[in-house]
Image (tube, rainbow, N blue to C red):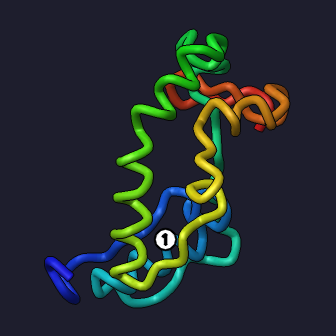
Amino acid sequence: RLYGHKMKVMHLEDLRLNPSNFYEDLASFVGASGSYPAEARFRKVNSRGKYGTELCKNATLEAALRRKLEPEYRAQEQILAVYGVPIPQSLRLRETRCDRLRALAESDMPICVDDYCDGS
C-alpha cells in the first residue's frame, strides 16, 4: 500500500449504485461526524442529455479503445485488490459509459441545464 491508511480507494460504480453509502464512507474517512439527513437525495443526471460524443455510435472505434485500455483495467483491479476493495462487476465485465448509456432509456435521466433539471 503506497499511502497506507491515508489513501481511500473507491470505485465509481459504488457511487452510481449506492451514493448515500459512498458519501457516508467518504465522509467518515476524512473524519466528518454525523450523517446525511434521511431526506437527502443524491440525484443522477445526464447534464448533456445524450451521449456527448460519437464514440458510442462507432462500434469499431469503441472495441479498439477497449483493447487499448485493457492494461488500465487490469491495473485498476490490482489496486482495488491491494486495498481490499471488491472488484465491481462493471470492471470485471469491462463495461464502459457507452454500455451504461445504451442500457438506460434517455427519458429515465433528467436533462439539466445550469441548475434547472427537466424530468426530475
Residue 65 x, y percent position in the rendering: 47, 26
Q: Position of residue 47 (x, y in %)?
A: 57, 27
| Residue where numbered disc 1 is placed | 23
Residue sitting at 50 percent across and 57 percent down?
Answer: 12
Quick check: 88 above or below 114? Answer: below
Q: Is residue 108 left or right of residue 85?
A: right
| Residue sitting at x 42%, y 69% | 10
Q: Position of residue 106 (x, y in %)?
A: 79, 26
Total marks placed: 1
Q: Measuring from the top left, give residue 44's x and y in whole percent.
A: 64, 46
Please say if 27 is above or below 90.
below
Three-letter amino acid code at the position of disc 1: Tyr
> Extreme left residue here?
3
92 versus 99 height, above or below: below
Q: Is residue 68 left or right of residue 14?
A: left
Question: Of helix, strand and loop, which one carries label 1?
Answer: helix
The quadrant where residue 88 appears? bottom right
**Residue at horizontal 44%, vertical 51%?**
73
Image quarter for residue 81? bottom left
Which residue lies at the image location 34% right of the left edge and 69% below the top edge? 79
